Each structure stands twice: as structure tokens, then as C-alpha cells.
Image (tube, rainbow, N blue to C red):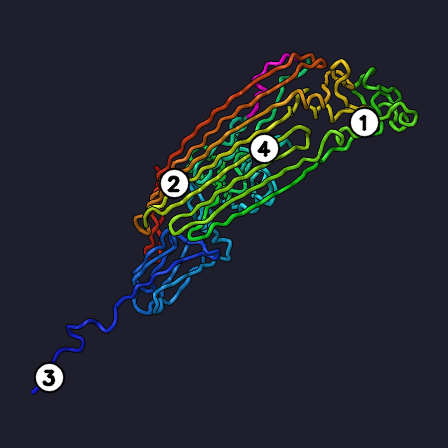
Amino acid sequence: MASADRRAPGSGQRPAAAQTQKVSGRVLDEAGNAIVGASVREKGGKRGTATDAEGKFTLQVKPGATIIITAIGLESQELAAGSAGSLDVHMKGHNAALNEVVVTALGIRREKSQLTYSTQQVKGDALTATKETGVLNALAGKVSGVQITSSSGQPGASSRIVIRGTSSLQGNNEALIVLDGVPINNAQNGNAAGVATTPTTSSPSSSVGGTSRLSDIDPSTIESINVLKGSAASALYGSNAARGVVLITTKTGSLDKKPTVTLNSQYSFENPILPEMQTRYALGDSGYKYFDGDINKGSTVWGPPIDSLVKVGIVKYNKNPMKAFFTTGHSYTNTVSVGGGAEKSSYFFSYSNLSQNGIVPTTTFKRNAMFAKFTNRITDQITATLQLNYTLSNNHSIPEGYDLTDPLWTVYTSPASWNPLPYVDASGNQRVFRFSRNNPYWDLYNVYNNGKTSRFIPVFTLNYRPTTWLSFTERVGADTYSQQADYYEAPSNVLGTVGAVAQLSTNYRQVNHDLIGQFNKQFGDFAVNFLGRE
């Protein structure tokens, strides 16, 4: 007689169904780029993880559970784990401006609503749309409380940025410039005229404007710019950032993306806005005295009416001297870039060529810029990024400001009845309509400054993330450039100067190193964030 089996159902046997299931997938943004560090957790449970450098995650959850995916600046999503256990999630950005993600000090991203200080962001597309050749000039009018001024209208002319007004009467008031977490130099240099000792009869030594070094950065490589205005935002950069910080974030490639080649050509032109001047009366005085500017010279332009002199053939030239002197400026920019990535790495390369001719004849600025950034996920916890920025620029400029060798000084006071060309006579002496002023066209070809700059900015970043709530970042960056400025001033028979030749060589090097630790952990409804820097 068979005995009955008295074991409880399932005793000593495998369970009828697994108690957990494995869920894996990938979290992407709307453009298909991987989202690193997104939080993935089981709803109502304690299990959770974070996406890796490729946006991938793996999590054990209860069968039929719901998972919640959150990321800074993106709308959270709740999804059923499903029976297949594989998910591809595309997250959308917040519509609310308060949840905008911005880059803060040391290149750390935070939601704008969580910040305790003021910051404004400008996207790279907005910068290139202005057709400006310099980064600072492209920022003009886009950030409140920021004043950007250019030293002159010459190509490559230096610009300065002041945030929330002047804070020092004698010291430096310009903001600190930070490129991908590394402070870089934005000094104005390239002026060798101050080295020259030119004996003159009536004028100070020549003043030739320089170029601010931020002009070496190609605007097409910039992803975004954040302007930090509060003292709390700049505390980690020390006293140099007391006047505010301009954070520049460069572009990067994308994981698992085929190479994308982008070609871009820009052309722009500019014409000067000129003040009104009287062109009715000829060179002369008292309304009837006429000076031809060759035999009879003078500085007053209140002679007889020009029309009356033209009718009798005394005057054959009648042109507005400013309109005759200035030309239409042209800027050509050609850029080619390649971006993409594989399973564990991404890359972005860019080359840009700029050629600019100014509204003042002979003035030019040329720049060749090369940029490369490569990111590789060495392990699941370690990611390395290497970027290189190299620029070679040349500029040709003329004297500016209060100086008798500045051609504009003469152009703005020239009579409409005197032809300045040719600027020398048969004996090789200058033709001038008055004494103590060079011919403006003679100045163009005989008093100038040539500058050549080679700049290299390498940055290496190593990120180690042992857990989802703890990370360490090691960053080493350098800013080096060498510059050669040559000033030339020919002897002037008008001013009585003997001429001058001067050379100024500048070599600059700055190395920065940061070790940053971040602690970000959620305790129930509370989040704890900690940042340390060495």
C-alpha cells in the first residue's frame, strides 16, 4: 500500500518562480546621447543603481515592479520592469526654466534652482550666430549686469569684461576666465611701442593697441558659457575670482555614434558709423581765405565755400575725408569638425581658419585654431578625458588713442577740399595740409605693429566613481603661449622724429591642478551634497 507523501507543497524543491528579476537597459536624452549618473531605483523598495559612462544600468527588482529613473535637469520617469527585463529610456528635459542645469565652479553641473547665487548661461550657437571673431564681443548684450568694451574697432582688438560694475579704482576689475575648469590668461599684450624711445617734437611715444588673449579661443568649439556673479560662486577660485567668473565649456563627442562631419563657412562685413562733419567750406579761414594745403597750410577748415572754388577750377577734389579713408571690413571663417564615439569612448576634433580685414586699411587679424577632445571609459568606475587646444594668430595694427602717429587723429580733422594722395611728393617727403600732423596714408605704411602668438592649452581629467554617491576628479591643465610683437616707426620729416624699431617677446606659462571629491546621497526625502577640493 503506497504511503502518502506528507511533505508540504514545494518543500525541498525549487521555487515555482524567481523572487527577483534582472532589469537592464540604457538611459538616453532626447538627442540620443547617453546620460551618465542617472538614478535608477525600484519604486517602494531599497534597491537602486546609477547609469555608467555609456548610460547603461543593471538592477535586480521584484517581478512586475516599477522602476523610477531620475536625472538632474530631466523629467523623471516611472516604467514597469516588464517580462523581458530590458529597457531603453529616452528622457525629456524640464520645461521649467528653474530646473535648468548649469555649469558651476570647477565644472560641476547643478540645477539652477538649487543655486544660492546668480548665474546666466549662453549657448554656443548664440555666440557663433553673432558672427563676432572674439568670444567676449559675442557675449555683449546677452548677459545682464555684464559690461564688455573693446579698445578699438581694429581686427583682433582687445576687449575687457566687467561684471556688476567697477570694484577697484586702481586694481584689476576684469572677470576671471575659466576653460573647462582651468583658469586661463586674458591679459592684453602685443604692444611693443612702449619699448621704443622715439624723440619727437610734439607727441608722446606711440601707442599701439594689443590683443586680449581670449581671442585665441575659437567660438565654434564652445558648448556654453556661464557667467557667475556671486562671491559664493567664485569662492573656490580664490581672490582672482572676486570680480566674477566666466566659465567656458567646450564641446565633446557622443558614445555609440557614427562620425559626424560638420562644415561651416561664415562671411560678414562691417562699415563704420561716422560722425557728421562739415564739408561745405574749404581749408582756410574767415570764410574767404583759402589754403591749398601744399603751398599754404593751415588747421582751420572755414575757408570759402567749396562749390564756389570748384566752379572756377581752383578746387578739383571734394570728398568727405572719413568716407574716403575707411573701407568695408570683411571677415571669413571656415570651420570643419568631426565628432562621434564608440562603445567606451567619444571624440571631437575641430579646425578653424579666420581671416579678418578691418575698416582701417592695412589692419588685419588671422587665426588658425585646432581643438581635440577624447574621452575613454577605462573601467566601469574610471573615465579619462584629454583635450588639446592650439592656436596660431597674427595681427597687424596701427597706433590708436591720443597720438600724433594715429592716422585717425588727422582724418577726423582733414578738409574735404584737400587730396591726401599721393602721400609723398617727388622728393619723398610727406604731403600734409598742416604742420605737426603726419599724412594719414603715410602713417598706415610707416607706423605699425605686427604681432604673432602661439598658444597651447592642454587639459587632462580623470574621474573615479567607486559608488553611485561618491566621486573623485583629478584635473591637470596648463596655459602656455609665446608672443612676438614688432613695432616699426619710420623717420618723419613732419614731426621731426628719427624713427624707431622695437621688439617685445612674451613667454607665459601657468599650470593648475585640482583634486575634487563629491558626495551626493539621498536619505529618504533629504539629499546631502558635499564638495571638497585640494
Give the amino acid type for the residue marked by disc 3 in the picture: Ala
**Secondary structure of residue under mark 1:** loop
Q: Determine the secondary structure under disc 2.
A: strand
| Marks 1 and 4, the one that precedes in the sequence | 4
Q: Is residue 442 above or below residue 141?
A: above
Q: Secondary structure at mark 3?
A: loop
Q: From which residue to which does the magenta span run? A: 190-200
Secondary structure state at the residue bearing disc 4: strand
Q: Which one is earlier in the sequence, the residue at label 2 or at label 1?
A: 1
Residue of label 2:
461
Residue 200 falls in image quadrant: top right
The Cα–Cα distance between marks 1 and 3, rounded to whole angstroms, is: 125 Å
Tell me, yes or no, if residue 72 can be seen here.
Answer: no
Measured in 3D between alpha carbons, the distance from the residue under mark 2 to the one under mark 3, in whole angstroms, is: 71 Å
Q: Is residue 130 left or right of residue 342?
A: right
Q: Nearer the viewer, residue 10 or 242?
A: 10
The crowd level at tag 1 (other Cα within 10 Å; few <14, some 14-19, many 20+) is many
The residue lying toward the viewer, choosing from 475 and 356, is 356
The quadrant in which the N terminus is found is: bottom left
Q: Which mark is residue 515?
A: none
What residue sits right under mark 3 in the picture? 4
Q: Cβ–Cβ below 8 Å for labels 4 and 2?
A: no
Q: Nearer the viewer, mark 2 or mark 1?
A: 2
Mark closest to the chain's N terminus, 3 or 4? 3
Which quadrant is home to the C terminus? top left
Residue 193 is a magenta residue: yes
Pair 1/4: label in front: 4
Mark found first going from the N terminus, 2 or 3:
3
